[in-house]
Image: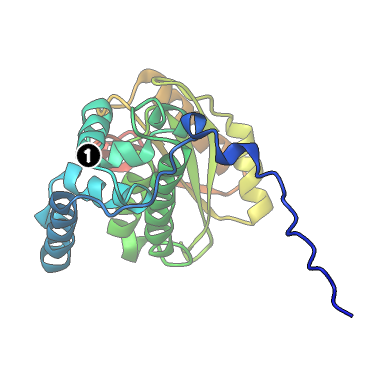
Amino acid sequence: MTTTPRPTEFREMPQWLFDLDEARPVVLPSKPPSYLRNHKKNLHERFVEGGAQAMPDYELLELVLFRALPRTDVKPIAQALIDTFGDYNRVLSAPISRLTEIEGVDDTVAQDIKIIEASAHRLARAKVMQRPIISSWDAVLDYCHTTMAHRETEQFRVLYLDRKNILIADEEQSKGTVDHVPVYPREVVKRALELNASALILVHNHPSGDPTPSDADIAMTGQIRDAAEALDIHLHDHLIIGKSAELSFRSAGYL
């Protein structure tokens, strides 16, 4: 018995196959142009051969930006960041909300910049924690400059030391405005007792760049010194960190 083959079923094709006029183009990934690849390669080679010292701020910043924007000409973005904030360090210290105001800087780019800043702080901190302050004083100053010199607002920190002058804690006590930070001597001394600290070093920054102490700085330092000494806690120093220099209350005769 022979069977008649059934006709092939016809199914209506999807409408979208025919709506060519409304089809959206698909953007395929492509390599960055050759001039950009060459520029990136040259920057990397110069960094490997000469380190950061061989590069201006904006070029070092380009290397950071390339991580998040590998197919973008990041030179204009880097220059805009430097023009806005002043230098490489101030770019790293800028808050995310301000970084993202720059054209081309999205949340991902801003977060990469803040990761670089956090890494620098952690490296500098590792060189001073659990070490005698006297023998690592230069490292302490480097750490204070790294973490505070380029901030746009004032920050007040306290370094707590044990009886051997070993740094046991570094804590931010408060943040302020461009020219003022609230400090509570009672809280500083209370925290020293909690940590069983025997000595203190006060540190705060002047965003203006000038480390000269104000009358309020001098008065506040005296209040903390008196409160600490009443509990047999010694105030070693108060450092004011400027953009490129610092002032020691002890060396300047204020303590």
Left or right? Give the position of 145 relative to 157: left
User: At which x and y percent is residue 146?
Assistant: 33, 47
Is 134 or 49 nearer to us in this picture? 49
| Color style of the picture | rainbow
Residue shown at 31% from the left, 47% from the top: 65
**In the picture, which quadrant includes the N terminus?**
bottom right
Secondary structure under tag 1 reads loop
User: At which x and y percent is residue 193?
Assistant: 66, 50
Q: Is disc 1 surrounded by few (<14), some (14 to 19) or many (20+) residues within 10 Å?
A: few
Residue 248 visible from this viewpoint: no
Q: Outermost residue toward the bottom?
A: 1
Residue shown at 43% from the left, 45% from the top: 114
Is 1 or 51 nearer to us in this picture? 1
Res. 255 image quadrant: top left
Is 156 or 51 nearer to us in this picture? 51
The amino acid on which the numbered mark 1 sits, given as a three-letter code, is: Ala
Residue shown at 75% from the left, 55% from the top: 9
User: At which x and y percent is residue 170?
Assistant: 51, 51
Left or right? Give the position of 168 relative to 196: left
Residue 71 visible from this viewpoint: yes
Left or right? Give the position of 228 relative to 54: right
Is 246 or 236 nearer to us in this picture? 246
User: At which x and y percent is residue 228?
Assistant: 56, 41
Q: Outermost residue toward the right?
A: 1
According to the image, label 1 marks what residue? 245
Residue shown at 31% from the left, 45% from the top: 145
- For residue 193, above or below residue 45: above
